Image (cartoon, helix red, strand yellow):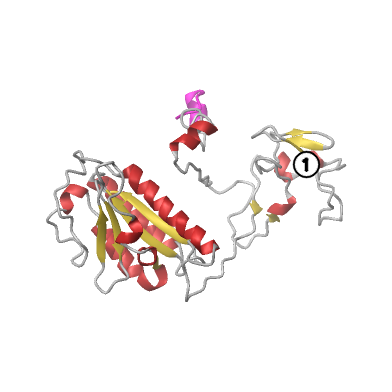
């Protein structure tokens, strides 16, 4: 949804907010049970900084952050002598008295030139956030390697799935060889892709009469089989993605010759599907990954 304003102003908006639509508040968000989130990426190079990967940026830990929502201080915040008011959540945070690395003086407190600091004075300011360092155990990657799962709705028409396939293939290329990648599809059933087997296949789980899954996903395919190491199974993952087609056109199609084929006609793609399993698929996949992560913290498996 648009934030409003004139047509010219709308063209300049890089981010249009929908938080006034849904979810309207935190209670509504919690009731949905969905993992809401946002990713913001610049659409063009920042005018104040060259596009140079070797350029040295100020470290993020030198910039003040809100003690409540962890937002960074900026020129839109209320700046006071002893602290500042966050423009995002309205929380008041005190300036840190720890001396900064620059000359051993505090960056904000009792700084007469505080308003000239780049994070306050400039409309855009680029900082370096500390990267997460993961140590992957090749003998036990589940629990030590980053995990990515593509959950794909095959009730979409072919032109939409073509874009989805291209996106998933690009993601497989981008995540790195140490990552674990899984493919899950859903229409009126959930498909779990096993690309690590000698004969790759799809295990399908239907819906029960109550609308839930007929069986737990773990019983259909162990999580270790779903999550394939990208470095060892990149070609198999890519081949599996290429076979994903609108649900109705999969019936009777050879597809990936070694992948399983639906055992019943599904009217999908441009037509209706009897019971679209989006809710059960999302809930079961998140619960599956979450339960495995809890077991991992207890000394068992992790994700």
Residue 7 colored in magenta in the image:
yes
Left or right: 139 as drawn, with respect to 51? left
Of residues 128 and 207, which is closer to you in this image? Answer: 207
Disc 1 target residue: 116
> Which residues are drawn in magenta?
1-11
Residue sitting nearer the eye, 75 or 93? 93
The secondary structure type at the circle numbered 1 is: helix
Residue 118 in magenta stretch: no
Q: Judge whether residue 18 can be spotted in this image.
A: no
Q: Give percent across and percent down for residue 237.
A: 33, 65
* Image point (64%, 43%), residue name: 124
Image-based side of 15 in relation to 65, left or right: left
Residue at coordinates 84% horizontally, 35% vertically from top-left? 81
Res. 129 image quadrant:
bottom right
Q: Looking at the picture, how far across and down is residue 80, in whole percent?
A: 81, 33
**Total labels drawn:** 1
């Amino acid at each position: 949804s648009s934030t409003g304003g004139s047509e010219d102003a709308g063209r300049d908006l890089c981010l249009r907010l929908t938080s006034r639509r849904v979810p309207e508040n935190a209670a509504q968000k919690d009731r949905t049970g969905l993992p809401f989130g946002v990713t913001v990426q610049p659409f063009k190079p920042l005018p104040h900084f060259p596009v140079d990967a070797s350029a040295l940026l100020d470290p993020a830990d030198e910039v003040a952050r809100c003690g409540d929502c962890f937002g960074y201080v900026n020129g839109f915040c209320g700046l006071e002598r002893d602290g500042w008011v966050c423009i995002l959540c309205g929380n008041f945070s005190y300036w840190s008295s720890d001396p900064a690395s620059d000359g051993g003086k505090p960056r904000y407190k009792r700084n007469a030139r505080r308003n000239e600091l780049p994070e306050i004075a400039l409309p855009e300011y680029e900082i370096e956030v500390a990267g997460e360092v993961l140590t992957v155990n090749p003998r036990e990657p589940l629990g030590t390697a980053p995990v990515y799962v593509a959950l794909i709705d095959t009730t979409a028409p072919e032109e939409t799935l073509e874009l989805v396939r291209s996106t998933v293939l690009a993601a497989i290329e981008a995540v790195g060889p140490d990552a674990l990648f899984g493919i899950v599809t859903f229409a009126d059933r959930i498909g779990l892709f096993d690309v690590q087997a000698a004969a790759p296949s799809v295990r399908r789980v239907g819906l029960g009469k109550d609308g839930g899954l007929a069986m737990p996903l773990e019983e259909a395919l162990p999580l270790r089989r779903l999550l394939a190491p990208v470095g060892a199974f990149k070609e198999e993952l890519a081949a599996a993605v290429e076979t994903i087609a609108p649900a109705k056109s999969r019936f009777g199609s050879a597809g990936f010759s070694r992948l399983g084929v639906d055992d019943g006609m599904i009217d999908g793609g441009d037509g209706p599907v009897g019971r679209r399993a989006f809710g059960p698929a999302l809930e079961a996949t998140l619960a599956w990954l979450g339960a495995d992560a809890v077991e991992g913290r207890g000394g068992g498996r992790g994700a």
